[in-house]
Image (spheres, rainbow, N blue to C red):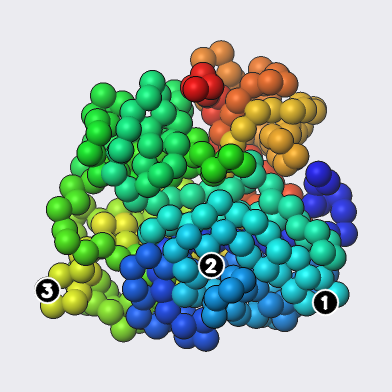
Amino acid sequence: MQIPTRSLNALVLVLLAAACGSAGDPDSMPANGGAVVQGNVMGGGSQNMRVAVPSSSAATTTNSVGGFVLTDVPKGAAALQFSGAGQNATLATAPMVSGEFRRLTVSISGASVTELNEQTETEFEGTVDAVDGMVLTVAGRKVAVTDATTIRKDDAAATFADLVRGTPVEVEGTLNADGGVTATEISIEDRNEAERIAFVGTLTQITGNTLTVGGRTVNVGSATVIVKGDTTLTLADLKVGDRVLVRGAVQADKSVNATRIRVLPREDEDEEMHVAGKVTAVGANSFTIGDTVITTDAQTEFEGNGFQSLADLKVGDFVLAEVLRQADGSLLAEEVKKFTPPPPG
């Protein structure tokens, strides 16, 4: 696999978030179980590229800077097709689970498309169906819990012992090539509501603790988590015009009590993301996870026992890097954590 920044291939950065609606109307009302794909195509031919889910009506076209929003992606969808500017390629992906938010990077050249799995991120809800050592089964996926995984309940620290069968959780982590997940954070939820929903829309009004998003009323409470990238926000940080992913419970009056609101980045903003996996190379000012090269600078923080600088990193180590995508497409590490993966089961 070639590093995209060292080739003429286009890069596609894709966000998949649970929701539904019309591909032509990003603020249309969602239904449960579907998905929204928001992304940005970087490189030659990124404008007016068609992005579609095969065998479905979900399709859209990238804008003048390569951005796109694809709605009404069916639950279980396992492929994305990219076409235009002499390129026509279909990417096989891990099937979407209900309520999922996914971010991935692929490299496209002609009829060939490759996913950089070490950069693929996912966020989804489910119930702990099984516990095998340090590996959970949630929504049909194997979720590996490591010493770098944060576990929380009601905005307080929790432990792995709290993750018993039947526990409702929200999982954030990296989606591996085999469809399993290495968890970065697991939130234990109080989920007694009959109907859960997730949708993307534009914030058009803020009145006290009540938002209007895509024409739907969203209630923000003390337990609502608001994030942008890896940064936790407050209600005061939200602005009219923000594009947000809302996850919550539908009430009798059809409003939504939000449990999580994720602010999506604008086209002109740098983007925070995670890269996780085994270190395959270490340089003077950079390291490589899989096929992804990540640079460091004086502000990069290193966390872990005996892990204080890049000099302490070795090929074969497993790390989780919080990175910022630069204007030239390169990745700069803000924070690097070592972790020990669970033994293969």
> Which residue bears the numbered disc 2?
37
Q: Quadrant of the N terminus?
A: top right
In this figure, which residue is indicated by the disc labeled 3?
252
**Relative depth, front residue between 163 and 309:** 163
Q: Along the horizontal axis of the image, is 13 left or right of 337? A: right
C-alpha span from label 2 to label 3: 29 Å
Can you give x and y, in whole percent of width and height, for residue 127 in the image?
Answer: 29, 44
Using residue 204 as the reference point, say whether residue 42 is left or right of it: right
Residue 44 at x, y = what percent? 83, 69
Distance from Cα at disc 2 to Cα at disc 1: 21 Å
The residue tagged 1 is 85
Residue at (68% x, 59% y) in the render:
91
Q: What secondary structure is marked by label 3?
A: loop
- The answer to whether 220 is drawn above or below residue 300 in the figure is below
Marks 2/3 in contact by CB < 8 Å: the verdict is: no
Q: Amino acid at mark 3?
A: Ala
